[in-house]
Amino acid sequence: MLERDSKYVSPAYTRSYPFVMARGQGSWVWDIDDNKFLDMTAGIAVTTTGHAHPEIVKAISEQASKFLHMAGADFYYENQTLLAEKLAEIAPGAKNRRVFFANSGTEANEAALKLARYYTKRPIYLAFYKAFHGRSFGSLSLTASKAVQRRYYAPMVPQVVHIPFPDPYRPPFGIPTEKLTDTILDFIENTVFHTVAPPEDVAAFIVEPIQGEGGYVVPPSDFYPRLHELLKKYDILLIDDEVQAGMGRTGKMFAMEHFGVIPDVITVAKGIASGLPLGAAISKTSLMNWEPGAHSSTFGGNPVAIAAALKTIELLENGLVENAAKMGELLKNGLKEIQKKFEFIGDVRGLGLMLGVDIVKDRETREPDGKLRDKIVYKCFENGLLVLGAGESVVRWSPSLVITEDEVNVALEIFENVLKSI
Ligand SMILES: Cc1ncc(COP(=O)(O)O)c(C=O)c1O
């Protein structure tokens, strides 16, 4: 299969190891040779309810037997309305929200970015270095995660200004951690707004509550509340990209709830439908003032994906968000214990089930060790544990939210043994 795949499938895909999926159940997956693995990736933070959750499978089959498609932008169907209502209900802040449906994270962000320009009539976007917002041209222009994602694709969408991210572990320009929030906000207000981005021309700032592809980086707790205050002063919209961190993963339905901020627009995808393709841009009602035809999508809001999403949210509300908080705590504590035994683990960080283990050459200098990280990820695979990398040197832990205490312990045991063998 690997040989045939390499002949016909795009070489742009980044496979870290040769896992060929045959089937899955909960947190477990089997390859085509019937080897069994514990999946701590959830298909890159997607299968919120685990693999093949019987209630999700049932919801999908029931909807599939009624109709597969009718174009929610051109016709009505009940479950699209119900999901919009539900998202309005669970999004932070008051219920006055409207939803645009898409098929993926990048499309949800395209919708948010277009809406921000349409509403404000302003041209400029702000985003962070190390941010990942997707790969289509609009969202790619905001993405600043890795050079390989942008190389040879210029010109990008113009009028994007990138700002250093307040990373407490590797602060930009060595800014002392306690001064990170003040320094970055001062840079935005007194340098960026005075030079390349007059605030009257800035439509929106798009942020990830926790940087995902950038290496699972959590900013200081006062950063987003204070950034939002600054943006409000200049009528600049805050777009909260919850594509990876949202839908319960961090132990709250939306990760921005950890910071007490109510964004103007929230985007979700990945985990919302347990594995079926669905994205959404959820905006304050007054803001989503598009005229008919201003934006649309043939497949966005597919009824089968929506059936999966409604069931996913029901399961999240009935215990899985809570489980993510509890199991996340266990996993993080276990990883922190392991950190004590291995000098090359520089940092263990994250919230809920969005955890990163940063591999370094030296704990003092915090120099990233990407090669060793890759070796660890591969050895984990050889030992029956699926993890993936994030950022330059981070082992990413993003399991399904159905994970149990026993499974957390199995994962920790395999991980520790792999590190010992290395
Ligand atoms: C924060 C964030 N935004 C957007 C995207 C893009 O999502 P998609 O791959 O569904 O287009 C991703 C994907 O990893 C993501 O992590």
Image (cartoon, rainbow, N blue to C red):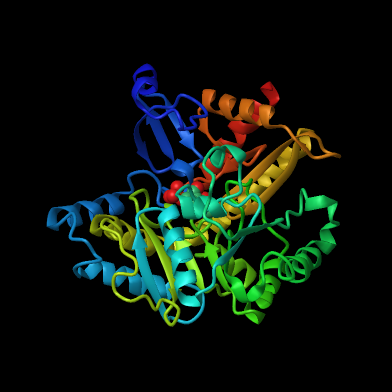
- Quarter containing the C terminus: top right
> Which residue does the image show at 42% across and 37% down from the upper left?
28
Residue found at the far top of this picture: 3
Task: Give residue 60's position: percent from left, percent from top.
Answer: 24, 53
Name the side, left or right, on which 147 lies relative to 8.
Answer: right
Asked which quadrant contains residue 84, the reply is: bottom left
Q: Is residue 184 left or right of residue 272?
A: right
- Residue 201 in the figure: left or right of residue 272: right
Q: Is residue 253 visible?
A: yes
Q: Quadrant of residue 78?
A: bottom left
Quadrant of the image occupied by residue 300: bottom left
Total tally of numbered discs in the picture: 0
Answer whether residue 171 is visible to the viewer in this image: no
Q: Residue furthest left?
A: 66
Q: Percent x, y for residue 245? A: 53, 56
| Residue 5 x, y percent position in the rendering | 36, 23
- Give the vertical position of 411 relative to 227 (above or below): above
User: Which quarter of the figure is the N terminus placed in?
Assistant: top left
